[in-house]
Every structure is written in structure tokens, then in C-alpha cells.
């Protein structure tokens, strides 16, 4: 099958809309992606024909909804090649909640004063704050692996930081700021040799490249449906069965118990032990067609498409005088989140001008304030791509930079020079 | 591609605003100032630092330096022109008037805000209001600091 972006675009209703009279150019996919018709239809179908609470009723609707919900679980598990998809996939609200689940349910039991939690200097706040909180609660120490000039993790520093005291290594597989793809398989080997477990933040990797948990041999993997064509409100936590089995619950309530007295309870088997209360049934069910869509395209093809587009964008941006692109410049080493600045122009001004041209990008600190400080900036602009983006949309971005230049003149460069 | 941006954007980025952004007034420092006030917005990264020199309850002179988006920097520059030489009571009244203009889109534009009237369009862009008010909040802090005996004060916008 050849990869035909024009055909793909027809499956995404929102791509037909205009913004301020211009065709929408949606380049904020690292924040959330658009949804294909099949996902939207599935949601509507569920509410029109199947809506019921799951795992409780003994009536037809409840049985159908439960079957569809559990089928999604299996599909997700197979997508990342989990060995026991029926037990190792836990549905949460988002990546953030998945990581908090591990930090609490695994961390409280396994961390003590003097133990070390290792992450990297390019983590999203989602893979940072939960560890800060658990470090405060347990007395464990935080250590982070530093970056080199080109935006890669420093291998020597990883070797130095991951050691005897390390209990968990929590690392993003793809940076949402620099785009860098990290060698998580190698890091997992290092961690395991040191007797530590590994959590991979897959929020940016799972949507954009083939990810195989058995190949990486990670202990936990967290990601969000909304960043991979699926609905908002669904996160995934993959965990190795042996580890999940001995962990205490994160939240308590209905669905996650077997037998309850006023004093104590026994907990449900995996994965229900970690899914307290009524879950986000409709959105979990509508996540399945999103995965079907990606599988029909093929994750290798998705990665190839984005790699080409990312290289095209980096090259085009670097040709614009005054533009600084952050992170690796070779698209084979990185994903499609391209962060940049344009002279001295504040990214909020830039993003506002681009919006008037129909171009949606992200501006700000991208939930990575420590990394921003490392880069020596307070904020940046970021364009990020997905399956439906085309080179002419990159061209529109570059043209819109021209509009910003017309409004702000060379003020930006002149001011920078005057300082 | 159109040569001109949309009217909506024109409302935000008026010529006068761009002029203040490109050529900020009262830029620099006052070594003998009574008060130094810093304002920072961690979400946007906008910063302003102002030095304030008082003569009794009158703001005799001020100097501003800053870094950030055009709205935050232009607002500081416009404010500096308006408040220089005014009494503390008058400054507080103007500050309230300015903030009112930014939060109440429909309200008539006050006539005594000088160039700051050009920032009226910001009211339509809710996320930018904080940019426009940063300098004013910082100045208010500076005045409070004077009442506490002078020195330095810093604020982080929430
Ligand atoms: C690398 C990374 N980790 C975690 C997250 C958090 O995802 P969510 O907001 O869906 O919890 C994001 C996205 O915002 C991300 O890019």
C-alpha cells in the first residue's frame, strides 16, 4: 500500500475547516492529534446503541459494553506487543495518571531513604513532578541524566547515574521538545543490571513509531490515546504482570475489589485492581478504531512519513534568517516535534500571528521548564506533525513567519543586536 | 497570501504598540532609585524590572528594562510615559482604570490613559491580558514597597 496523505486527510473531518478565513494548518500534534471519522462514529454509535456500565450488569447492553471495552484492552496490548494483554494493560485518564499510578503504587512500597530515582533533563513535567512528590514522601533522591550539545542524553552520564542505589529509571522515549529519540532499550539493560526497574514515557513515541515492550524490555510504559488519533480521557499503563501483581492498588473503590468488610478488603485480579470506579467506557471503546487506523497505515510507514516531513521542516526553518531550531537536526534520530525560535520575537507573539494565518502551533515552555532553562530560553515555538500533515503545510508555516516579520519588522533582530 | 494580516490581529498589534515595543520609553536604570520592583510571569517568561524614584508621594522618575512579548513590553513602556511625575493616588486610579478596560470588553475606553488606550484590543484575547497587566502589577508592588520603607520587591504572576 502506498502512503497517500491526500486520501488520509479525507478521513479527518476537522481538516476541512477554516480558521480566520484560512484553511486550518494543524501543527500542534504533540499536544493532541485530530480524530478520524471512524473514532468519532464509534463514540456516537456507543452512546446511541450500547451505553451501559461494564462488569456489573447481567443484561445485554452491559454485556456488549463490557465485551467492547475488554476488546480495546486486548487491541492496545497487542499494539505494543504485551505478553499478557488481558492483564498487563491498565486504562487510566492519561499518561500523567499512568505515571502517578506507578510512582504511588510501586514507589511507596519500594522506595526508602537513600534510594535513587533516575530520569533525564528532557522530561515532561508529567514524568518529573510525580517523582518529586514520591521522593518527598519516601526520602528517595532524584538524579537526572544530562544532555549533550546536540540534545541527546549523555551516555557517560547515564552510566554514571544508573548504579547500585538506583531503584527506578523513568525516561521519555521521545522528547516533546527536542524530538530526540532515546535509547530506552539500552537504558533498560543498564537499569536491570543495576537491579532497578524502568518506566518509559511513551506519550510521544507510541503514536509515532513502532514500540515493542518485549523488545525494549521495559517494566512500565505510559501513553495517551488522545495523542494517537484516539479520544481524550484515556491513558494506558502497561506493566509487566509479575510487577503489577505484587503492587498495592492506587485508588480504592468499586470494581477493584473482591470481598469487602468494614475493616478490610481483598483486591480484584489484574487489571481491575488498578481500575477503581466506572472507567471512561465510551472513550476506551473508541480508542480501538484509532489503533485500527494506525495499524492499517502501518507504524513503519507512519514513522517514515513523519521522518521525511520533519527533515523537510527542519531544513526549511533553518533557511529562514533568524530561526534557531533546537534538538537533533537529523530526522533519523528524532521525532516530529520541531521546536524553534524566531529571532527575539516572543513565541506568544509568533503563535498569535500564525493563528491569524490559520497555522496552529504551540508556544510556551511545553511543560518542560527545567529543559527550557538548559536551553537558555524561557519559551519556544513548536510545530509537530502527524499522519495527515503535508509539505505544503510546512510551506504555509514558513510563509506565516514572513507575516510575523512584516508586523514586527526586523525589530526582533535589531533589539537582539542592541543588547 | 494576503499582504496584510487580519483585522482581528490589527486590533491587537496596533502601530502604536509596535512602536513602543521597538522603541521602549524610559529604558535604562536609575542608580539612586528608592525602589526596585521586578515582575515575572513564569508561564510566558515575560519579565520587567523597574526602578522608581519618589519625591514625597509623587513618582518623580522611573526606568524600566524587560524581556518578553510585545504586549508586555509595550504596556510597560506606555505606562512609564503615563505615570512619570504623577502622585501615588493618581497612579492607583489609572491602574484600576487600565485593568478595568482589559477585563470588560464592552466598557467605554477611558480618555486619560494616553497611549495605553491602544491596548484596548487585548481585552478580546483573554490569554494576553496577563501580559498587559504585568508592568502595572509590578508598579503597584513597587509603591507598596515604598510604603514599607523602600528597597526591592519581586513578584511572580500566578
Ligand atoms: C513526553 C510527554 N509525556 C507526558 C505527556 C503528558 O500527557 P498527558 O497530558 O496526556 O497526560 C506529554 C504530553 O503532553 C508528553 O509529551
Image: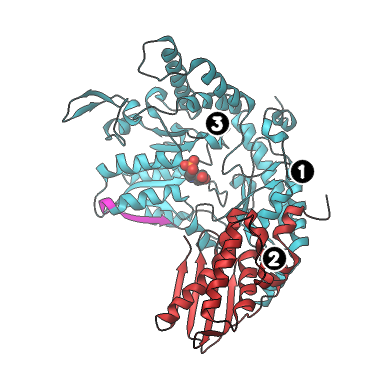
Chain colours: A cyan, B red
Give me the C-alpha separation between circle 1 and circle 2. 25 Å
The kind of secondary structure element at disc 1 is loop
Q: Residue at x 26, y 51 (%)?
A: A138
Instruction: Please tell me which residue lies in front, B89 or A417.
Output: B89
Magenta-span inclusion, residue A122 = no
Q: Residues within 10 Å of mark 3 (few under 14, many from 20)?
A: many
Instruction: Please tell me which residue lies in front, A183 or A173.
Output: A173
Q: Is residue B49 above or below residue A345?
A: below
Give me the C-alpha separation between circle 1 and circle 3. 28 Å
User: In the image, which disc is placed on residue A169?
Assistant: none
Instruction: Please tell me which residue lies in front, B18 or A131.
Output: B18
**Chain letter of the residue beneath label 1 in the structure image:** A
What residue sits right under mark 1 in the picture?
Answer: A21
Q: Do the residues bearing badges 1 and 3 touch, measured as CB atoms within 8 Å?
A: no
Q: Is residue B149 above or below residue A52?
A: below
User: Quarter of the image holding residue A278?
Assistant: top left
What residue sits right under mark 2 in the picture?
Answer: B118
Q: Do the residues bearing badges 3 and 2 touch, measured as CB atoms within 8 Å?
A: no
Residue A12 image position (x, y, % from top left): 67, 30
- Mark 1 or 2, which is nearer the eye? 2
Residue A366 image position (x, y, % from top left): 54, 52
The kind of secondary structure element at disc 2 is helix
**Chain letter of the residue beneath label 3 in the structure image:** A
User: Quarter of the image holding residue B9?
Assistant: bottom right
Q: Which residues are magenta?
A: A137-145
User: In the image, which disc is placed on residue A230?
Assistant: 3
Q: Residue at x 45, y 26 (%)?
A: A77
Residue B110 image position (x, y, % from top left): 65, 66
Q: Residue at x 69, y 71 (%)?
A: B115
**Chain letter of the residue beneath label 2 in the structure image:** B
Amino acid at each position: 500500500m502506498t502512503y497517500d496523505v491526500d486520501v488520509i486527510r479525507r478521513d479527518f473531518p476537522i481538516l476541512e475547516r477554516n480558521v480566520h478565513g484560512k484553511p486550518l494548518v494543524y501543527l500542534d500534534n504533540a499536544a493532541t492529534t485530530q480524530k478520524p471519522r471512524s473514532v468519532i462514529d464509534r463514540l456516537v454509535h456507543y452512546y446511541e446503541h450500547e451505553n451501559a456500565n461494564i462488569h456489573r450488569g447481567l443484561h445485554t447492553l452491559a454485556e456488549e459494553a463490557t465485551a467492547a471495552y475488554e476488546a480495546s484492552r486486548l487491541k492496545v496490548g497487542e499494539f505494543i506487543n504485551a505478553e499478557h494483554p488481558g492483564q498487563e494493560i491498565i486504562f487510566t485518564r492519561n499518561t500523567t495518571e499512568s505515571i502517578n499510578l506507578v510512582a504511588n503504587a510501586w514507589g511507596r512500597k519500594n522506595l526508602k531513604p537513600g534510594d535513587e530515582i533516575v530520569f533525564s533533563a528532557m522530561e515532561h513535567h508529567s514524568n518529573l513532578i510525580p517523582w518529586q512528590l514520591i521522593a518527598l514522601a519516601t526520602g528517595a533522591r532524584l538524579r537526572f541524566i544530562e544532555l549533550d550539545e546536540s540534545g541527546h542524553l549523555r551516555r557517560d552520564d547515564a552510566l554514571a547515574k544508573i548504579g547500585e542505589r538506583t531503584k527506578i529509571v523513568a525516561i521519555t522515549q521521545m522528547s516533546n521538545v527536542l524530538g530526540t529519540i532515546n535509547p530506552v532499550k539500552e537504558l533498560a539493560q543498564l537499569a536491570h543490571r543495576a537491579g532497578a526497574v524502568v518506566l518509559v514515557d511513551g506519550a510521544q513515541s507510541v503514536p509515532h513509531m513502532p514500540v515493542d515492550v518485549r523488545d525494549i524490555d521495559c517494566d512500565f510504559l505510559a501513553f495517551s490515546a488522545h495523542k494517537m488519533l484516539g479520544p481524550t480521557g484515556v491513558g494506558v499503563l502497561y506493566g509487566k504482570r509479575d510487577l503489577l501483581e505484587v503492587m498495592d492498588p492506587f485508588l480504592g473503590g468499586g470494581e477493584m475489589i473482591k470481598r469487602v468488610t468494614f475493616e478490610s478488603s481483598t483486591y480484584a485480579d489484574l487489571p481491575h485492581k488498578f481500575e477503581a470506579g466506572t472507567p471512561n467506557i465510551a472513550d476506551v471503546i473508541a480508542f480501538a478504531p484509532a489503533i485500527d487506523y494506525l495499524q492499517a497505515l502501518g507504524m513503519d510507514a507512519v514513522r517514515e512519513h513523519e521522518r521525511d516531513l520533519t527533515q523537510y521542516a527542519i531544513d526549511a526553518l533553518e533557511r529562514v534568517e533568524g530561526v534557531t531550531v533546537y534538538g537533533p537536526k537529523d530526522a533519523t534520530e528524532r521525532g516530529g516535534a520541531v521546536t524553534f525560535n524566531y529571532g527575539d520575537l516572543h513565541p506568544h507573539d509568533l503563535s498569535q500571528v500564525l493563528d491569524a494565518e490559520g497555522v496552529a502551533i504551540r508556544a510556551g515552555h511545553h511543560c518542560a521548564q527545567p529543559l527550557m532553562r538548559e536551553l537558555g530560553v524561557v519559551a519556544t515555538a513548536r510545530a509537530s506533525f502527524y499522519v495527515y500533515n503535508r509539505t505544503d503545510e510546512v510551506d504555509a508555516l514558513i510563509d506565516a513567519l514572513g507575516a510575523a516579520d512584516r508586523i514586527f519588522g526586523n525589530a526582533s533582530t535589531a533589539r537582539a543586536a542592541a543588547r | 497570501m494576503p499582504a496584510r494580516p487580519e483585522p482581528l490581529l490589527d486590533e491587537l498589534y496596533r502601530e502604536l504598540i509596535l512602536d513602543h515595543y521597538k522603541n521602549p520609553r524610559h529604558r535604562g536604570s536609575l542608580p539612586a532609585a528608592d525602589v526596585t520592583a521586578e515582575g515575572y510571569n513564569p508561564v510566558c517568561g515575560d519579565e520587567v524590572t523597574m526602578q522608581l524614584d519618589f519625591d514625597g508621594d509623587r513618582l518623580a522618575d522611573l526606568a524600566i528594562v524587560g524581556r518578553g512579548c510585545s504586549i508586555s513590553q509595550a504596556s510597560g513602556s506606555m505606562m512609564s510615559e503615563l505615570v512619570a511625575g504623577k502622585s501615588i493616588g493618581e497612579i492607583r486610579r489609572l491602574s484600576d482604570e487600565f485593568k478595568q478596560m482589559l477585563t470588560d470588553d464592552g466598557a467605554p475606553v477611558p480618555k486619560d490613559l494616553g497611549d495605553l488606550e491602544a491596548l484596548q484590543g487585548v481585552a478580546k484575547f483573554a490569554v494576553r491580558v496577563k501580559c498587559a497587566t504585568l508592568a502595572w502589577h509590578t508598579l503597584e508592588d513597587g509603591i507598596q514597597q515604598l510604603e514599607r520603607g523602600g528597597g526591592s520587591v519581586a513578584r511572580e504572576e500566578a
